[in-house]
Image: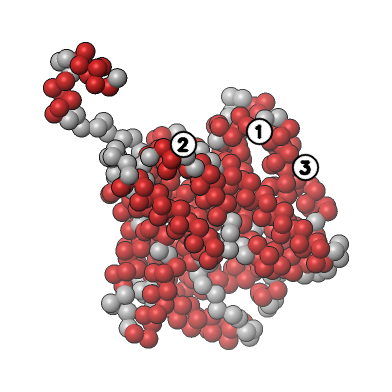
């Protein structure tokens, strides 16, 4: 057994890097490693660990709703639900894959989170270097931020919002995890945080940027008795934001989209401003939700309803609009399954927040804050990089922090306790 566990730390590090790999490579790597661990921990390890099946099922219960809707969806729309089942499979698979690992294996995984930080740094560095090699320093055009974000996604295979989620979590790991804080002290911590902040400011995804400031507020609150720790972090943040706004046109252009709303007119084309387009998306979502807020539409019919409403808005605004998804995971689940869907989603998040605060697991709480905030602006479970990130890390923290009951006492052990000298002899 020792030979099988000798390389667990290396495998855990590969898992952390896998979250920044392209979709197909990511799934191949994760499936291979977890299949090995599940087989080994169940067939080559005689120790029986307590398994909270109910907790794992709760985490993956939304996936069951999608499966139950397949037979009730007409054949013309069934392919969409089947696609959802394939795309969101990790919602159900990840909690049970982690459930069938030994607790020690899960602890090894959670102990190598620093390699997730390294993976984020390398991926963002590569994306920015390739962009500079492709376009040089001619990056000050009026649509430079669009060009940059599209090229970044092409090189890294990551949409800026999902890379922003990764960067926020990487920042939280450096700030909150005691083990990694010990590894990176003083100027070393600032030297790693500064480029992470700068990468995030360059991409400027709305929800992750908001999540970053929530993280820093939370970090300040839990360290309110040690204010000397806050000054260097705040200084690094101010420096990175200043450099981004002054030197990086992508950042200032994205910020300019918000300021443009002040002078916006109802007749303006929302396609020209992502913030205005978000307002249209929000209005369309609410219009459809008003009609179907009780029972929902079913996951196979949401896109049709949204497309029809976008056609109404196109005629009303006299501007051709592209149909978007809900860009909001809460509304997406609400429209898909009605009050049951939104209620189940809030229950899952609520149970996890309660567990995180009860255990005083600040990193787990911050992870939940990041995804909860991003749920307001993205269908996180509709992108592989989003759903795999969410399902793996939430299940890992949930199961690793479970308080295990004592092992049941075997009859033969009770019998030998009356003769301690014999027990010592047999152990020896």
Identify the mark nearer the N-term, 3 or 1.
1
Identify the mark nearer the N-term, 2 or 1.
1
The residue that appears at 69% across and 55% down in the rendered structure is: 124
Q: Which of 382/181 is in front?
A: 181
Dot 3 crowding, Cα within 10 Å, few <14, some 14–19, many 20+: some
Q: Can residue 131 be seen by looking at this rendering? A: yes
The residue that appears at 45% across and 33% down in the rendered structure is: 360
| Residue 304 place in picture, x, y as percent | 45, 81
Q: Secondary structure at mark 1?
A: loop
| Residue 339 place in picture, x, y as percent | 34, 63
Q: Which residue is mark 3?
A: 239
Q: Secondary structure at mark 2?
A: loop
Dot 1 crowding, Cα within 10 Å, few <14, some 14–19, many 20+: some
Q: Quadrant of the N terminus?
A: top left
| Residue 408 place in picture, x, y as percent | 20, 32
The residue that appears at 45% across and 57% down in the rendered structure is: 32
The residue that appears at 29% across and 45% down in the rendered structure is: 52
Q: Is residue 413 left or right of residue 56?
A: left
Q: Which residue is mark 1?
A: 184
Q: Is 220 placed above or below 294 here?
A: above
Q: Which residue is mark 2?
A: 361
Residue at the outermost top position: 421
Quarter assignment of residue 66: bottom left
Identify the mark nearer the N-term, 2 or 3.
3
| Residue 118 place in picture, x, y as percent | 64, 46
Q: Is 40 placed above or below 311 here?
A: above
Front tag of 3 and 1:
1
Quarter assignment of residue 310: bottom right
Front tag of 2 and 1:
1
């Amino acid at each position: 057994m020792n030979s099988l566990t000798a390389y667990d730390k290396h495998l855990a590090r590969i898992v952390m890097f896998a979250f920044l790999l392209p979709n197909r490579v990511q799934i191949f790597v994760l499936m291979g490693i977890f299949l090995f661990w599940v087989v080994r921990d169940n067939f080559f390890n005689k120790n029986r660990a307590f398994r909270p099946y109910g907790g794992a099922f709760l985490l993956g219960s939304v996936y069951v709703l999608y499966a139950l809707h397949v037979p009730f969806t007409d054949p013309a729309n069934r392919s969409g639900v089947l696609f959802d089942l394939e795309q969101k499979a990790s919602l159900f698979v990840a909690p049970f894959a982690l459930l069938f690992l030994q607790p020690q294996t899960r602890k090894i995984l959670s102990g190598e989170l620093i390699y997730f930080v390294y993976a984020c740094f390398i991926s963002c560095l590569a994306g920015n270097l390739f962009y500079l090699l492709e376009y040089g320093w001619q990056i000050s055009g009026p649509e430079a931020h669009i060009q940059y974000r599209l090229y970044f996604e092409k090189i890294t295979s990551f949409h800026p919002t999902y890379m922003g989620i990764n960067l926020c979590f990487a920042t939280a790991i450096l700030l909150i995890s005691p083990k990694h804080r010990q590894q990176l002290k003083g100027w070393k911590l600032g030297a790693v945080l500064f480029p992470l902040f700068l990468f995030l400011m360059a991409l400027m995804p709305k929800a992750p940027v908001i999540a970053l400031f929530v993280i820093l507020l939370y970090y300040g609150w839990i360290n309110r008795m040690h204010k000397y720790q806050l000054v260097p972090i705040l200084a690094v943040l101010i420096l990175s934001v200043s450099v981004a706004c002054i030197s990086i046109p992508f950042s200032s252009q994205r910020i300019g989209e918000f300021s443009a709303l002040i002078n916006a007119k109802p007749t303006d084309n929302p396609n020209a401003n992502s913030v205005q387009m978000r307002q249209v998306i929000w209005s369309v979502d609410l219009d459809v939700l008003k009609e179907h807020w009780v029972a929902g539409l079913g996951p196979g019919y949401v896109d049709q309803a949204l497309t029809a409403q976008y056609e109404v808005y196109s005629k009303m605004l006299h501007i051709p609009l592209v149909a978007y998804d809900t860009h909001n995971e809460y509304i997406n689940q609400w429209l898909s399954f009605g009050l049951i869907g939104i209620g189940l989603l809030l229950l899952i998040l609520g149970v996890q927040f309660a567990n995180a605060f009860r255990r005083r697991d600040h990193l787990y709480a911050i992870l939940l804050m990041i995804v909860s905030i991003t749920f307001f602006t993205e269908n996180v479970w509709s992108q592989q990089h989003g759903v795999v990130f969410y399902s793996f890390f939430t299940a890992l923290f949930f199961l690793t922090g479970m308080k295990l009951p004592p092992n049941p006492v075997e009859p033969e052990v009770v019998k030998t306790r009356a003769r301690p000298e014999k027990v010592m002899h047999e152990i020896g």
